Amino acid sequence: MFSAGLAGGSFMALKNFAEVAYKEYDITIIGLGTKPMHSEKYEIIGIPYPRYDGVFGHITAKYQLLNLIFQLPLYIIGFLMLLKDRPRVVFFNGLATMIPLLPFAKLVQAKVVLSFRSWWDQDRFGKIKPLIDWYGKHTDIAYVNSIGTKENLSQIIPSDRIVVVSHHANPLFFETRDRDQIRKNLGLSKQFVFLYVGRMDEEKHIPLWLDVIKSFEKDSSLKFLFIGNGRLVQSITALEKKNSQIQYLGFMNKPSKLSQYYTAADILFTNADETYLSRPAIEALSCSTPIMVPSIPAVGEKISKGMTIPDTLFPQTVGWLLKQNTKDAVHKLIVDIIKNDEATKKRSTCLQYAQKEYKKDPNELLLEALLRV
């Protein structure tokens, strides 16, 4: 499995499949950056390199040529590994990772699987469509996280070769916890707690959230926690020095630790696409915590096109879809939520919804499809 980054949602998609498929395959995940964890079920190799989910990933995502250049060490080591190991199956995390290496994967007669969490923009990349069609023709299976992404990717790869593997939550997040004790242990008993988990950059609406936080800077009853990484971490830590309401907790990848903070939080500020919720949103719901989601998709191409998230993406009994993505509108909404104790009232519904929608692991479907190829 080749991945530009060893963190974030797209990496988790590889990791989650590896957790299911390790009995059928000897699995190695190789990517750029620090090795995030150890597993008895599969091997992870981190190539010492700047993290993709930092400044470099933000820049290269906008310019595909830079993206290809950035991943050059992965291509070189990947080429050598393909020739040496001659694997049965090769996974690629994204088109940019796949393009240089797919011909060599086919040379060693490997099945090719594409993990796709992006958006094919015909207007932007139409000139290279014939080349991409060739790659699509030689991709045995692609897997995506929503029906909408499947419809988009079917411009390149036939839909009968695309498997929808929707987000789901680790069973650990559904476990019963003593919320009062957790909040006491974390020193949060007396505060209304907002949490953000994930990549911190403009696409994820962090500038909006920071503006909202500044509008509450005189209210000591509120606490704003941040977990993750990204190019705007420095902006957050700079505010943290000036404002005791803000606390940056660094990057976490252990569900046992994350679940403590999801449970302690009153609301998770998070993001979505127009057809699916982010993984942190699903994990928070599984811990009974309601979500607050801007109505603008957290994907650059969709932001530029003015696309919006429909009201039907999730029931309003488990959170709030922001109709107006402005500081003043969100400030007013938060004041009303706290005044009417709305967050507490939604907690039981959040868990029920998550148990119904996100408890079953859909990676079994992908494994079945791969074994049939």
Image: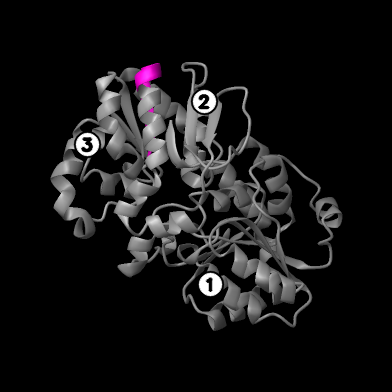
Q: Earlier in the sequence, mark 3 or mark 1?
A: 3
What residue lies at 67% left-to-right and 67% top-to-bottom?
237
The residue that disc 1 covers is 207
Q: Residues within 10 Å of mark 2 (few under 14, many from 20)?
A: some
The residue that disc 2 covers is 20
What residue lies at 85% left-to-right and 53% top-to-bottom?
185
- Callout 1: helix, strand or loop? helix
The residue that disc 3 covers is 135
- Height in image: 285 above or below 322? above
**Quadrant that contains the N terminus:** top left
Magenta part of the chain: 83-93
For this view, does 156 lie left or right of residue 210?
left
Q: Residues within 10 Å of mark 3 (few under 14, many from 20)?
A: some
For the question of whether residue 104 can be seen, the reply is yes
Q: Earlier in the sequence, mark 2 or mark 1?
A: 2
Q: CA distance from mark 2 to mark 3?
A: 27 Å
From the image, state whether disc 2 or disc 3 is nearer to you. Answer: 3
- Height in image: 197 above or below 336? above
